[in-house]
Amino acid sequence: MTVFRTGGLNFRRRRRKMKISTAKGILLWIVEIFIVLLLAFVLVYCAGMRVSVVGNSMESTLSDGSVVLVNRFVYNIKEPKAGDVIVFLPNGNEKSHYYIKRVIGVPGDKVQIKNGLLYVNGELYDVEDTETIKNAGLAEDEITVGEDEYFVLGDNRNSSEDSRYANIGNIKKEYIQGKAWFVARPFNKMGKIN
């Protein structure tokens, strides 16, 4: 009578070979994780910076305490243009808070404030803006915007520290951190910045 064991150690068992479909599944999983991490890095690098607005210099576009998302990548591809709302460090001072202002003059433009009105290249800048500017500052005399420089103003012209003042002046491109593109808070003003 022969007795066969059904349990216990058996050194004659064959090792299970890993199936090809299992290997493909693991490889696919690793590739998906890599793609998600790459996408997360790009998203954080391009739009991950957020800045809080300090003061009312950008009223009515942005109010004090608003949280704004900043696209840090866009100006690596193209130059800032008139009308863009930018985030910058004044004179590159990394210990200062971020300033948020609107680009008025780009390299080569001539900017001047006469009789409370803003002129760019001799033409009235914003016909719809009826508020007169009380303090022309440095822009009382015509300012020519230099190469890689930008003339900026706050939307609330009479309550803004901007390129009209010597401590800010024209903003060099290297000091620009990015383009403010989206209001994240307060929720009732959430949306794209124009």
Image (tube, helix red, strand yellow):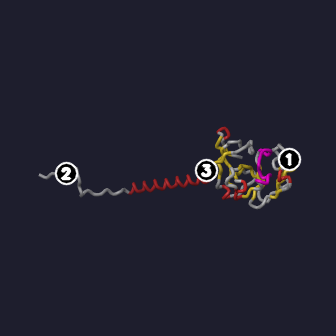
User: What crowding class fits label 1: few (fewer than 14 Cα within 10 Å), some (14-19), or many (20 or more)?
Assistant: some
Give the residue at x 54% y 55%: 38
Could you tell me what secondary structure mostly forms the magenta stretch? loop
Q: Quadrant of residue 57?
A: top right
Please report the bounds of the magenta region as a residue range.
156-167
Where's residue 17, x and y in %? 33, 57
Q: Give the mark, 3 or 1, whose residue is nearer the N terminus.
A: 3
Callout 3: helix, strand or loop?
loop
Q: Is residue 165 magenta?
A: yes
Q: Nearer the viewer, mark 2 or mark 1?
A: 1
User: What crowding class fits label 3: few (fewer than 14 Cα within 10 Å), some (14-19), or many (20 or more)?
Assistant: some
**CA separation in Å, label 3 and label 1:** 38 Å
Instruction: Kindly check if marks 2 and 3 are in contact, taking CB atoms under 8 A apart as contact.
Output: no
Q: Is residue 54 magenta?
A: no
Could you say which is closer to the camera, residue 97 or residue 100?
97
Where's residue 102, x and y in %? 74, 50
- The kind of residue tagged 1 is Gly
- The kind of residue tagged 2 is Arg
**CA separation in Å, label 2 and label 1:** 102 Å
Callout 1: helix, strand or loop?
loop
Which disc number belongs to residue 116? 1
Residue under label 3, please give it.
48
Where's residue 180, x and y in %? 68, 49
Q: Give the mark, 2 or 1, whose residue is nearer the N terminus.
A: 2
Relative to 148, 13 lies left or right: left
Number of on-image labels: 3
Which disc number belongs to residue 31? none
Callout 2: helix, strand or loop?
loop
Give the residue at x 87% y 50%: 114
- The kind of residue tagged 3 is Gly
Residue under label 2, please give it.
5
